[in-house]
Image (cartoon, rainbow, N blue to C red):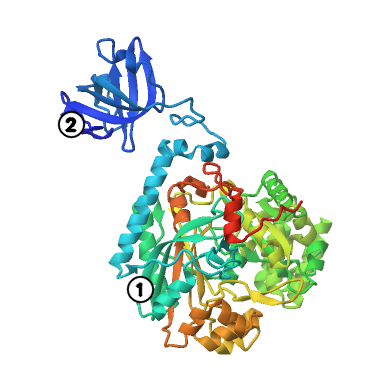
Amino acid sequence: MHAYRSHTCADLTAKNVGDTVRLSGWVHRVRDHGGILFIDLRDHYGITQVLCDPDSPVFAEVEKVRSEWCIRIDGTVKARDPELVNPKIPTGEIEVFVRDLEVLGAAQELPLMVFGDQEYPEETRLRYRYLDLRRENMQRNMTLRSDVVASMRKRMWDKGFREFQTPIITASSPEGARDFLVPSRLHPGKFYALPQAPQQFKQLIMASGYDKYFQIAPCFRDEDPRADRSPTDFYQLDLEMSFVTQQDVFDTIQPVLQGVFEEFGGGRKVDADWPQISYADAAKWYGTDKPDLRNPIKMQDCSEHFRGSGFAIFAKLLEQDGTEIRAIPAPTGGSRKFCDRMNAFAQKEGLPGMGYIFWREKGAQEGHLTVGDMLRNALAKTAASEILLTGIKEEQDRKVAEQVAEFLKTGETSRARLLVDGYFGKHEAAGPLAKNIGPERTEAIRQQLGLGIGDAAFFLGGKPKTFEGVAGKARNVIGEELGLTDKDRFAFAWIVDFPIYEKDAETGAIDFEHNPFSMPQGGMEALMGDPLEVKGFQYDLACNGYELVSGAIRNHKPDVMLKAFEIAGYGEDEVKNRFGALFQAFHYGAPPHGGCAAGIDRIVMLLADTVNIREVIMFPMNQRAEDLMMNAPSDPSNEQLRELRLRVLPPED
């Protein structure tokens, strides 16, 4: 028999009853039932129940074991009594009577329990990650990650890609984040960098004549941590192709990722239709370039309804250049309680609040039916003379009728109809905004947004970049709270037409807003105009509110590359110095090429249905970019510093 096991803890079934077996694993838990000891023995594959009573020659030894001891047992497989069968596990029909025991590794008192669902502080979990990783959910997540990577590799090979490895120690490159620098011992005072991505190398692979490349690539970025981003390193499915258009890249990566989500999504719906949304429209409709399309809410520009209105805050705001009022529809959100709650949300986000209107069923008021019918008859005939003001008792009704008559005289029939529907219809607009702008404008807003009784709309104003972020968050919260977001679905969207440049609000300087290696749409001609109007052949893939993929068709022409960097303030010498190999390679017949990279950690995070990326990384850093288990970063020794000819300055206060 093998030194440690004849079977795993998931192998044994009723077919093995009577067999002598050897199992090794960890003591998941111990139960004492009137002198009979039951142990759930666990390994990576599953759990087997073993038992021991005073008739066993090792009963006294079994009494000593505790949770998370690593042990080997020999024993005889027995059938469980029918009423004790556990259908939830593969080994639930049997148990093993212990006849021999060897303690392979005893455990001290545990800083966290592996058995059960207890919650522990993240710092405890990361400090004792080797224990945390034994827990069922973490075992499942890490297995899922491994299987997803294997599936990606197979799908890429099936599409004719080959896997090539690129360097880990390289030169610094400005790709949107800070580099991790590595001092050189052989070249004192000089530094290597860990690659933020294999960007330049994969482009050089294309220039070298290899048609299709992919790699499960480690990337290193000295970034501030977030729940959905590792602060130091991450892995991506990196790919590049020659002689391709943007659509070719989309058509290549979609079946790979769609297949992965269908394979590992646990039965959740995976959308096959991946719309292409411009960066500008994504910001306008969703307040973000990574929209969650499971939420059907689409924001709309409602500026015209507030221009010159009685709501002075918005009316004056719209007198400034570049401002607008945006509406967030909230179907079924038409209650003052919900509206007040969303207003409080905006205040927590640093805004004074959010204006709102909600629509409710209009209470019956004496005379409304008669006056309303009269005005509708006049509208049908477009005849102001049909409106008999002397028969209207209520002063407000008379004012509305006078306004309707005036609209009809000036040919503004549509405005007359909106006013009648808004004031005499079934809908009643409520809230501070409704009182200030009046029934005609509120009705126009309702019709534009397609809302009805029981619905609401929220409004934010100013220059879009100042409020889009909060508007996007508000849209997500509204979708969640009103139950509009479909949780059982993966919804994808390509975000395209990214601007290449942006202007610094303080200095007015032009710099790259997105990937500097992207080919500008329109080539050199586009670069001769307004830089802020230049769009790139750059694209992201969003899924359920997260960015999963980023890529571009690359700028492979030396003259276009120089001009693109010149606009951002990089001279020719600096381009040659920082991107010398790539720039030089483009002078020797570089093919048109493009590609993308898909974030593996984030993909697995979605598939595992968790919002914290550290739940799907084997040994992650904490929020302060520290490895508590390995004590990193650590102080270098004086000998190391001397060898590298470095001196460490004390931290600033």
The label nearer to you, 2 versus 1, is 2
Q: Which mark is residue 496?
A: none
Q: Is residue 233 above or below residue 195?
A: above
How crowded pointer 2 is (Cα within 10 Å; few <14, some 14-19, many 20+) is rated as few
User: Left or right: 558 with respect to 151?
Assistant: right
Instruction: Point out residue 208 in the picture as x, y percentages from the top left corner.
Output: 38, 80
Residue on which disc 2 sits: 1
Residue on which disc 1 sits: 212
Say which element carries label 2: loop
Q: Is residue 239 above or below residue 394?
A: below
Q: Is residue 509 above or below residue 490?
A: below
Question: Could you tell me how many numbered marks the image carries?
Answer: 2
Mark closest to the chain's N terminus, 2 or 1 = 2
Give whichever of 103, 375 is nearer the camera.
Answer: 103
To which quarter of the image does residue 215 belong? Answer: bottom left
3D distance between C-alphas at marks 2 and 1 = 49 Å
Give whichever of 611, 564 is nearer the camera.
Answer: 564
To which quarter of the image does residue 150 belong? Answer: bottom left
